[in-house]
Amino acid sequence: MRAIVVKAYGGPEVLSWEEFREPRPGPGELLLSVRAAGVNPVDVYLRSGGHGASLLPFVPGFDGSGLVEEVGRGVRRFHPGDRVYFSLWKNTGAYAERVVCREEEAVRLGDTLDFAQGAAVGMPCATAYRALFLRAGALARDVVLVHGASGSVGLAAVQLARAAGLTVIGTAGGEEGRRRISEEGAHHALDHRSPEHFRQVLEITKGKGVDIVLEMLANANLGKDFDVTAMGGKVVVIGSRGLVEIDPRGLISRDLSVMGMSLFCASPRERQIISAAVAASLEKGILQPFIRMVLPMPAAAQAQRLVMEPGASGKIVLVPPAFV
């Protein structure tokens, strides 16, 4: 089979579309024909040698969708020909024509979603759910600020929060992104490139501040988030691309909690909860992945450049050449 292979850590140029060893399913595993693979920022970090980098050589990608080709011994829930989406919790390998995943890492893909949408489910939707409900403990009537809401995680958070009865304030850097988050359910869509948006958050909340902040770019916003978070509120840091200096008095004066959030830290029990909740939300139409762009898999370098650009809206997906 062919796959995107990383043989040395570095920039996008190290991503090579070439022949790679055929995967074989073991007990409790599925062999999938990949129809689409989701591109996530963590893929970029691994390619460059950071974030607990994989052993070389490796095939990037955690999320994808496809058809079951073969099942290993002991598999009961799936059969050859089933449509599934998957999220690899420990290994990578989605940027390929075929991949092996554990039975519990795959979920049946409903007829209402195409393969590109299926590839957009795994990491973004699971991250949004865990941050909002398992870390922040969000409840109906809470006010949440999704800082950077136009990306795939942010849009999933907006959809989940709105359906759960929260008041949703989303921010985006471009007009298209703000229009998208409004369409997906945000009550307010603010321009986070404007310093005035922090003042606007306080105006919307009548000076009280928000109960929860989901922060996608902590290095740019964290210290200022404290000023717009209500007494006893929570700030969940999902992403950061650099160092940040904060004044601890902003925490002390409001009795705030700041917590990190990595999907890789989820316990096995949490993974079960997340998987079931995301599947149910997809079935009910609460979660509707928005696809920004579909590219052929050999264009993985372009996709990884695009996923790191500011102001992105929606998900970038890679498709094997045979299915473009």
Image: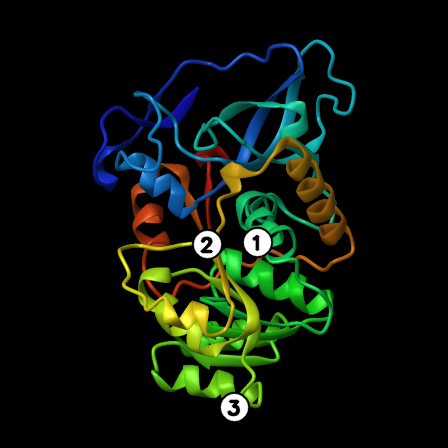
Mark 1 vs mark 2, CA separation in Å:
8 Å
Residue drawn at x 60%, y 58% as measured from the top left: 136
From what the image shows, is residue 220 above or below residue 111? Answer: below
Tag count in the figure? 3
Q: Which mark is residue 131?
A: 1
283 lies above or below 138: above
Badge 2 is on which residue? 238
**209 displayed left or right of 61:** right
Judging depth in this view, the residue of 157 and 308 nearest the camera is 157
* Residue plotted at (64% across, 50% down): 134
Q: Residues within 10 Å of mark 3 (few under 14, many from 20)?
A: few
Q: CA distance from mark 3 to mark 1?
A: 25 Å
Q: Position of residue 190 (x, y in %)?
A: 47, 80
Amino acid at the residue labelled 1: Ala
Q: Identify the residue at horizontal 30%, vertical 21% (top origin).
A: 56
C-beta proximity under 8 Å, tags 1 and 2: yes
Q: Give x and y (percent) for residue 110.
A: 74, 44
Q: Eyeballing the image, is 2 above or below 194?
A: above
Are the two marked residues, 2 and 3, in contact with CB atoms closer than 8 angstroms? no
Measuring from the top left, give residue 106's x and y in whole percent.
Answer: 65, 31
